[in-house]
Each structure stands twice: as C-alpha cells, then as structure tokens.
Amino acid sequence: MAEPRSRIYHRGRVAESLRDEIGSMLEGELSDPRIGFCHVTEVVMHPASKSARVFLAVDGDAEAEEQTVIALQAAKGYIRHELKERLGLQRVPELSFHVDRKEKFQGRIDELLHRAEKRARKGTPGPNTAAAE
C-alpha cells in the first residue's frame, strides 16, 4: 500500500527544518575545535521518522572530514536536545552524520567530460575548415 502524501510532505518539511537548524548550530553554537568548516547538504529521514542521516560537505582533507564526523557524533545528544527545544518536536529522530562527497565526485566527472570534449574537438575538423575548402 502506498504511503499517504501528507506523511511524505510532513517528513520532507521536518527534514528541511532539521537541515536549517543543524546548519545554524554548525555556524556558531558548536565550539568543538575538531569541527571543521562545513555545511549541511541534505537530511534524509527514514520513512518511520525514527532516524535521519545528516550529510555534510566538509572543507579539507580526509582527516578533517573524519574529525568533524567524530566531533558531531559526540555532540549528538546536545544537538537532539536543541532540536527538540527549537522545533517543538515530540520525538527527535536519531541522527547519524555522514560526509557528502557528491560535490567532489561531480567536480571530477565535469573535469573528465571537459577533457573528452576537448579531445573530440581536436580530432574533428572545425566549422571554419570545412567552409574554407
């Protein structure tokens, strides 16, 4: 049986609110030095709304990403408490933090496509050479 649209929309609205609030906490409230410069890219909630995956884009190397995730896992209780207070939710979903590597992969894919396009242009005659003959 399909899930009612109202439940899907509600879950989407809650996920967006979680993304905004966790993002504002990352900007200034969490003072752990292990937390690097990062922002929340996406929050994906489980269909039962009992858990949520928080995806972060972290500036820096793999060590900075790992330290940021460890620090946020340690601050998970504080974050959940603040979310309950700010959003007025009866049950705040269990949070898990993950590094979002989509942007890095997308950049690499764009670079490879650009290289392939340049090679294709070099191998085929341009529009000006065909007109000159």
Image (spheres, rainbow, N blue to C red):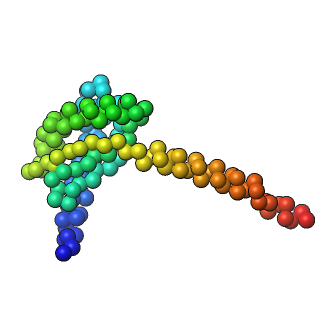
Residue at image coords 27%, 33%: 70
Q: Residue furthest right?
A: 133
Residue 39 is situated, as x and y percent measured from the top left of the image, at 35, 40
Quarter the C terminus occupies: bottom right
Q: Residue furthest top?
A: 33
41 relative position to 121: left or right = left
Decide if residue 17 is in sight here.
no
- Foreground residue, 41 or 63? 63
- Foreground residue, 42 or 117? 117
Q: Quadrant of residue 78?
A: top left
Residue at image coords 27%, 39%: 24
Residue at image coords 55%, 50%: 110
Residue at image coords 25%, 35%: 72
Decide if residue 74 is in sight here.
yes
Residue 121 is situated, as x and y percent measured from the top left of the image, at 73, 56
27 relative position to 93: left or right = right
The correct choice, above or below, for 76 with respect to 106 in the image is above
The correct choice, above or below, for 56 with respect to 28 in the image is below
